[in-house]
Image (tube, grey):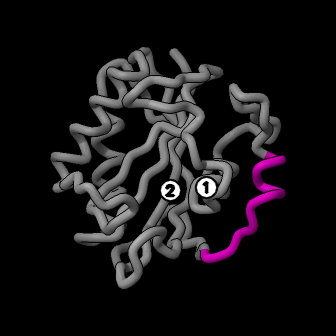
Amino acid sequence: MERVYVGLGSNLAEPLQQLKAALAAIAELPDTRLAATSSFYASDPLGPPEQPRYVNAVAALDTALQPLQLLDALQRIELEQGRVRKAERWGPRTLDLDILLFGSRLIAEERLSVPHYHMHARPFVLYPLAEIAPADLRLADGRTLSELLQACPFAGLERLGNDVTAR
């Protein structure tokens, strides 16, 4: 079993409920255990303007699945929850599930890059991750989570808590 961190995000179709449903689906994946979930955070959207704020979280999983098997399973969950992949990057979506870290692996595949290619600049990833990861977490590329946090301000985030009821 390897420890994997997955970023979750949604800004359409009741985002908080989308994340809760995704966490329930992740908990049902074979050979996988949902170990921890961060608080939920509201964040300003990246990309096109005129879209709603996102709700984000990070989940820690222990899995025996291989990286591409897990990616396929997460993309199935996205599709089951109404995700439509469009050419436009960073547009609104019902659900986005990203593998952030996969144990101590450095992965550079056509479909998967780990550590996640832009997590170092995303407070909506780093701050939830810091809630559930070890304080001395070191990424496979050598950077530490504490270094990334120091370089990425908490700007644009609102901590919603661990068990937020639907708004």
The residue tagged with tag 1: helix, strand or loop? helix
The residue identified by callout 2 is 57
Picture coordinates of residue 126 (x, y %)? 65, 53
Disc 1 residue type? Pro
Magenta segment range? 146-156
Query: Magenta includes 147?
Result: yes
- As drawn, the residue found furthest toward the bottom would be 50
Q: Position of residue 70 (x, y in %)?
A: 36, 26
Q: CA distance from mark 2 to mark 1?
A: 6 Å
On screen, residue 103 versus residue 76, left or right, reads right
* Quarter where residue 91 is shown: bottom left
Which comes before the other along the chain, label 2 or label 1?
Answer: 2
Q: Do the residues bearing badges 2 and 1 touch, measured as CB atoms within 8 Å?
A: yes
Which residue occupies 30% across, 22% down? 30
Is residue 165 found left or right of 78 in the rendered image?
right
Above or below 167: residue 86: above
- Where residue 145 appears, as percent x and y from the top left, is 76, 43
Which residue is the site of mark 1? 128
- Local crowd at mark 1 within 10 Å, few (<14), some, or many (≥20)? many
Residue under the image location 43 percent in, 15 percent down: 64
